[in-house]
Image (tube, rainbow, N blue to C red):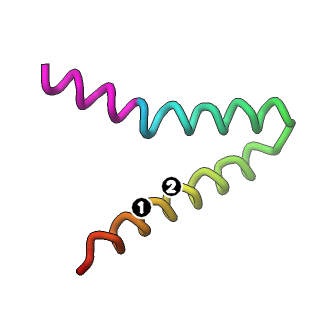
Amino acid sequence: MKALILLFVASAVLVIPTSLVWLLGRRARVPNWMLVVFLLAGWLTAFVGWVLSQRT
């Protein structure tokens, strides 16, 4: 049961925002390479921000 909840949370936090950005970008006819760079930069920024916020 714990694994199922963790899977749901991971899906809600990672997969859904990424897929929404991808679908909106495709609808706006943004090139694929630009979407990939945008998504990678966004997740890298979020990860680095999280790591830095954990430091005391």
Q: Is residue 43 above or below residue 27?
A: below
Q: Is 28 or 1 nearer to us in this picture? A: 1
Could you tell whether 38 is left or right of 34 in the image? left
Q: Is 6 or 56 nearer to us in this picture? A: 56
Quadrant in the picture for residue 22: top right
Can you say which quadrant of the picture contains the N terminus?
Answer: top left
* Magenta highlight range: 1-11
Amino acid carrying mark 2 in the image: Trp
- Which residue is pictured at 13% across the width and 26% down the height? 2
Residue at mark 1: 47
Residue at mark 2: 43
The outermost residue toward the right is 29
Q: Are marks 2 and 1 in contact (CB under 8 Å)?
A: yes
Alpha-carbon distance for marks 2 and 1?
6 Å
Q: Residue 10: horizontal and vertical position, in percent?
A: 34, 35
The outermost residue toward the bottom is 56
- Magenta span contains residue 2: yes
